[in-house]
Amino acid sequence: MRMFACLSLIIGAVALGSCSVSDERPEAEQAPMVSPLLTSDDAKDPYSYARPEVARVTHVALDLSLDFENENVAGTATLDVLAEEGADTVVLDTMGLDISSVTDGAGQDLPFRLGDRQEGMGAPLTIDMGEARQIVVAYRSGPDARALQWLAPEQTAGGEHPYLLSQGQPTLNRSWIPTQDSPGIRQTWEAKITAPEPLTVVMSGLSGGDPADAGEGRRAFRFAMDKPVAPYLIAIAAGDIRFQELGPHSGVWTEPAMLDRAAAELVDTEKMIDAAEELYGDYRWGRYDMIVLPPSFPYGGMENPVMTFLTPTFIAGDRSLTGLVAHELAHSWSGNLVTNANWSDSWLNEGTTSYFENRIIEKLYGKKRAEQERALNFAAMEETIAEKGADAAITALHLTGDNADPEGGASGVIYDKGAAFLHSVEAIVGREKFDTWLESWFDRHAFQPATSAMFLADMRQNLVRGDEQLEARLMLDAWVYEPGLPANALRPDPGAFAEVDQAAEAYAASRTIDQPAWRSWTSAERLRMLSKLPPELPDADLARLDQSFGLSASGNNEILFAWLKLALQNRYQPAVPSAEKFLATVGRRKFVSPLFETLMEQGEWGKPIARRIYARTRSGYHSVTTRTVDKLVTGGG
């Protein structure tokens, strides 16, 4: 075992009157929790420059000023480093940061080097620490910081004030925080953030109370996360936002114009927390608050601890899409409590969470809804495997090679095959036995990174327990390391959509759907129906569908998306205005990318439409979305 010495570094800022580093720290922060570091080959992260086995960051203290006019953040980040004995350098991840100086605590210059920048990784910042215990690096985020999106007032619901939001996963936080940006290097953190009045700042840490006057029309907000988290989970949002309590442990932030609708949609949050705790043990993060962001947010949700970020596209008015909230809540155990050590095992985060989400849905809304949602996800998995090829490496849960890129993999595998794996194990060993094991997995590895090998080893030791017949039935290695779908996969109940599937068969012959039946169907049933419609439909049939069921005006964004995709793949011109409106008001990549891809696949009809719309809407999308759509639209011939 190597001996380590603790070092403290301050990554400091451009001199700003409103930013300073205090020498005083609260007592609770004198000895923050430190997570273990995994050093096995399968735990190493090739997408970070850090050398954590030599010197690793354990705590980050931010002191930053938000500059909306110039769209940057500038300030200090104080890093505590655990270093191997004799180590005199530390390597950090950066992306486009403007580093102006590096000194020790006494103001003496220290050598530092910014290495060559690599696409998707940024550049390494190597600091020669020597014997220094405080190192001050002056920095400012660059104009194209990929984690940050600065919105003009007209891009918000209120239309009066600007807005800032961040998205750090998988490797984007290095564009505004100089740290070791790897999921296996967990860090505690704290922050002081100043912003112009009347904007309010929230972060993925517990609030330090009411903001303080920082002078010159600015206010200072403080936050802390005393539990070590993967650095991609440090998140910030700032804007004209208000808070509404949902219960003793939860509440929602959003713009005033959206607050009532958001709170109504999230009314079951406390019940979800109770259900999750009944399943897999205590919620360990204190509060569970959420912020409903402007529609440019690129994901459905982001599981930032104590402050889940949510897209407004989940608001349907009937809580039919709140599976998204159950998913992000479940991440408080799978993903946040126990985190994939690197991105080759991202299924550990997402697949386990998708399984957990389904169990929450069943507990709250009943077996029928849970079984229907599982059936939709299983079908998405099968579609992905068919599209990629059952022997394609990308269909294995543990990813290798280029597929292990932080933005690689396929959601139908990472999410849906991962969930199918756990559903199958549960069915074979029994729910009670499986639940006991899964809760114990979270307990044994709380606030730690993990790998697929660790997950299977724990399952074998604490669930299989030497039972050779059970081992053979479970096919654990086949699920995790081999492509395709193992023969023991638990298939959804074929009766979950019996009525809908019969209606779909009838539609193929009659081209009609019973309107009372459609009105009585759940969101999942309507989505199933749309997925079962013939892929090629004439304009007259599409017009009848839209007129009968108001698809173009649906308030359920999942249904609207499914309809628009079907219409565009049939080159249905009357759907183009609805598609253009949708793409101009929604930035969620799950919706935006497939619609542009569908248009581009329509050749001379669709490509001009795609390029015209994208030219108008691109500036409103987050970089996560534009990096995907740019390749589709500009590289589509």
Image: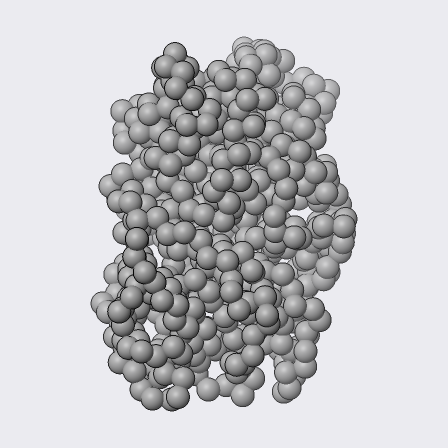
Quadrant location of residue 550? top right
Left or right: 79 as drawn, with respect to 581: left
Q: Is residue 631 above or below residue 238?
A: above
Q: How is the image coloured?
A: one colour
In the image, is residue 555 above or below residue 210? Answer: above
The residue furthest left is 116
- Residue 562 is situated, as x and y percent measured from the top left of the image, at 53, 33
Q: Is residue 249 visible?
A: yes
Position of 525 with respect to 92 (left or right) is: right
Give the camera-side residue of 544 and 151.
151
Q: Nearer the viewer, residue 499 or 221?
A: 221
Q: Is residue 520 left or right of residue 491?
A: right
- Residue depicted at x 27% and y 72%: 88
Residue positioned 56% across, 74% down in the render:
25
Q: Nearer the viewer, residue 115 or 554?
A: 115
Quarter of the image holding residue 528? top right
- Image height check: is 538 above or below 226? above
Question: Could you tell me if residue 95 is visible in this image?
Answer: no
Looking at the picture, how far across and down is residue 126, in whole percent? 28, 71
Q: x, y (%) of residue 399? A: 31, 37
